[in-house]
Amino acid sequence: QPVQYLADYRPWPFTLSETRLDVTLAPRDTRVRAELRLTPQQAGSDLVLDGGTELRLISLTVDGQQPDPSHVIREGERLTVVAAALPQGPFTLATEVGIDPADNTAFEGLYLSNGIFCTQCEAEGFRHITFYPDRPDVMTTFSVTIRSDLPVLLSNGNPVSKAPGVAEWHDPWPKPCYLFALVAGDLVAVSDSFTTRSGRKVALNVWVRPGDQHRADFAMQSLIKSMKWDEDVYGREYDLDVFNIVAVDDFNMGAMENKGLNIFNSKLVLASPETATDADYERIESVIAHEYFHNWTGNRITCRDWFQLCLKEGLTVFRDQQFTSDMRSAAVKRIEDVQALRARQFREDQGPLAHPPRPDHYEEINNFYTATVYEKGAEVIGMLKRLVGNDGYAKALDLYFDRHDGDAATIEDWLKVFEDATGRDLAQFKRWYTDAGTPVVEMSEDWQDGRLTLSFRQSTPPTPGQTEKPARIIPIAVGLLGPNGDEVAGTRVLELSEDSQSFDFDGLSARPVVSALRGFSAPIILRRDLDDATRAFLLAHDTDPFARWEAGRELALSALTTLATGGEAGSSYIASIGALIAEDQTDPAFRALSLNLPGEEEIATRLAYLGQTPDPDAIHTARTDLARRIASAHEPLLSRIYDEMTVPGAYSPDAVSAARRALRIAALGLLGRIDGGERAEVLFGVAGNMTERMAALAVLLRLGHGAPALAALLDEFGDNRLVMDKWFSIQAMAAPPQDAVAVASALAERNDFDWKNPNRFRALLGGLAANHAGFHSVDGSGYAFTADWLIRMDAVNPQIAARMSTAFETWPRYDEMRRAHARAALERIASVKGLSRNTREMVSRMIA
Ligand code: BAL
Ligand code: ZN
């Protein structure tokens, strides 16, 4: 498959009005009979269908007749029925193919996962089930018959009939084939119902393995909350009689929004206090919401082509972020989202894999399910909302749903509804979709006679394939604080549209302190010359929680980058953070976020951004030393917090309880630097929840004292896959850097390193990659270990190998020795014969 270009988009020359599938399941020889009702739209067009090379074509007829064999051509992933063999009016194409789900280790199409048949069709998996126009702009109703002795047989839409060995489903909503799903297995349901605001009673089921029911309640409650929220906030109602969610263990993604039948990675459904952390609960709630919200933003309105992926993903992430803000603390959620954006998307934007939220070419679309498409796509919508206001946003969204329901839409359609609803011209704003890279905005201040002038200069560094970066529309939310800390000017949004611009604030009686980029109003890097005293002032007084947190972050980063490059620093941060965490009335979650030091990767990113070569060992040492100094300076305070932030009563994953635990374990992490792990050891033994046990274990592992706790977990949870994933991951992640590769290698030797399971593979390889100084060992052993496993995985599951290859995406910023090792590892991967298109594209972009 050559490079695909957005500019080459052409409508499909047929319409498809109905799809009927009849699937007889068998692990080694599943038969799929498909009937497609087609009408040519352009005379003389050949019918070109997608279909994996592994499909065994058993029969093909056009209106019941077998065409002349010379009129049916199979070439690569294509099957062509030439125009001469087709009627000029509507006709039915019927095919039967044989497939082998038991042999499908790529988990794309129909596969078997521990006795459960399930499907994953986004982006282009349906072509591994049958011959079909596998593109999102071909939408039709589906009627599906499933034949199998397994007790539970599910597909999209509403159930039509069920008898022993056979079930029929009908989905009345036209959909592209990437939203098709089928599940069959020995499953049990946790059931409930939801009555929509127009009175439709919807049966809700979360399907899990027998014995896991008690871990599915939280997912069910999250679903009900999501359904209600989408009605209340977006006016969107569910549209089928039943909504099914299924949890499976082998899944490439987190979850998938198939119409009426969401399939989830079991780690995003199953949760109980003794197995799941607070972060797991929060993530389950948000992903359940995300997939549910896709019913409108993704399914009812889908994408014209895969270049438009951020149309559904950016919007749906934005919606799930809003949902979590409403369910929990909006301030905390915003800070968490910015942290995640910087860690993943800024990293992507600053390296060889940078691409715009709407790319204009790709080789393998699966490589574009990225932080840029998802998280930056959501940030772009947040900016749009800020620019047109809440009412403008609400009007635009109503128009979007009215105008495009049933469509396969584009980013142009999306922006047009905002233009039509609000009268605003968005031509320049569109650059956020088409241009890659993180804009850097330099802000300077001038103070004269009661007037403050803020001057801005924006620029965006070049990214692969894009050297010119014209100015963008950038909303910068600014507030002003007086010398006593009071807010003297409330938040005002300054709109940048040119390379350089200035804004005046008049009538001020004293020079104010500027609180800038409030709420992280744009996904940019804001540069301003601030001294530590001003940062400390903002950390003490800013009324905007994001800006307040950011001031502390900048203080910490400035100290850590200085320490990591041989300087002396940290006292200002240590004093300020002590004052903040002593504020008993301040949200414990906010205090926890402020107390957690930036990670080593973030410090490296900052150093690279400042034009320095990050030294992973020096960064590790700097961070460890600063943590120890904080602990020594504030031991009594941290100890009091640790003792006070217990949560009485039975575990509950609610935001208030989770916030207290978050602050408690932040204190534990620091105290563990000076108490020899004493508190962690006790806590690991007595804690009744996984949040505190994992935090305690991390402290013990960093100290090299983890063995007894690891043994205890293994003993207790050896047969629980999700807990064992954590067990693998934390060992690689928290090992002292010099031991990390050895620890990972030893884990990889274990019988229970079931590496073909994507979660287990990600746990170990992702755990090592998250151990910054361990992965970037100067001897190249981290790179070599990772490359070995990527090569091995690529032959089995290309999507997972390609995704994990991003561990290397920052390699160009390190020193010559590390670069040489990394390049050698990447070249070794590139030289593998038969390497997948997925991994080849990733590696070649990284060594271009
Ligand atoms: N569409 C793939 C999974 C998700 O973003 O919901
Ligand atoms: Zn999504």
Image (cartoon, rainbow, N blue to C red):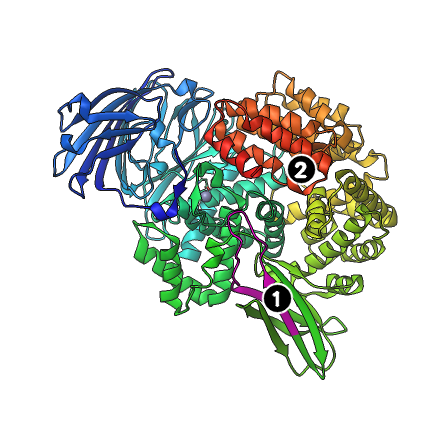
Question: Toward which corner of the image does residue 353 lie, by quadrant?
Answer: top right
Q: Which part of the image, by quadrant, shows the C terminus?
A: top right
Q: Position of residue 724 (x, y in %)?
A: 62, 26
Q: Is residue 483 visible?
A: yes
Q: Residues within 10 Å of mark 1 (few under 14, many from 20)?
A: some
Considering the image in quadrants, where does the N terminus appear?
A: top left
Q: Is residue 301 left or right of residue 379?
A: left
| Mark seen at residue 457 | 1
Mark 2 is surrounded, within 10 Å at the Cα level, by few (under 14), some (14 to 19) or many (20 or more) other residues, namely many
Which residue is drawn at the image coordinates 85% and 34% (left, top)?
Answer: 676
Which secondary structure lies at badge 1? Answer: strand
Residue 823: mark in rendering: none
Judge whether residue 380 is colored magenta. no
Whole-percent x and y of residue 250? 49, 27
Question: Which image quarter has ligand 2?
Answer: top left
Residue type at mark 1 is Arg
Spatial CA span between label 2 and label 1: 44 Å
Q: Quadrant of residue 760?
A: top right
Q: Residue at x 66, y 83 (%)?
A: 507
Say whether residue 465 is magenta.
yes
Q: Which mark is residue 691?
A: 2
How many numbered marks does the figure carry?
A: 2
Q: Could you say which is closer to the camera, residue 53 or residue 588?
A: 53
In the rendered image of this protein, does residue 744 appear above or below residue 302? above
The residue lying at 18 percent from left, 43 percent from top is 42
Is residue 187 placed above or below 365 in the rendered structure?
Answer: above
The magenta-colored residue range is 454-477
Percent x, y of residue 361: 43, 44
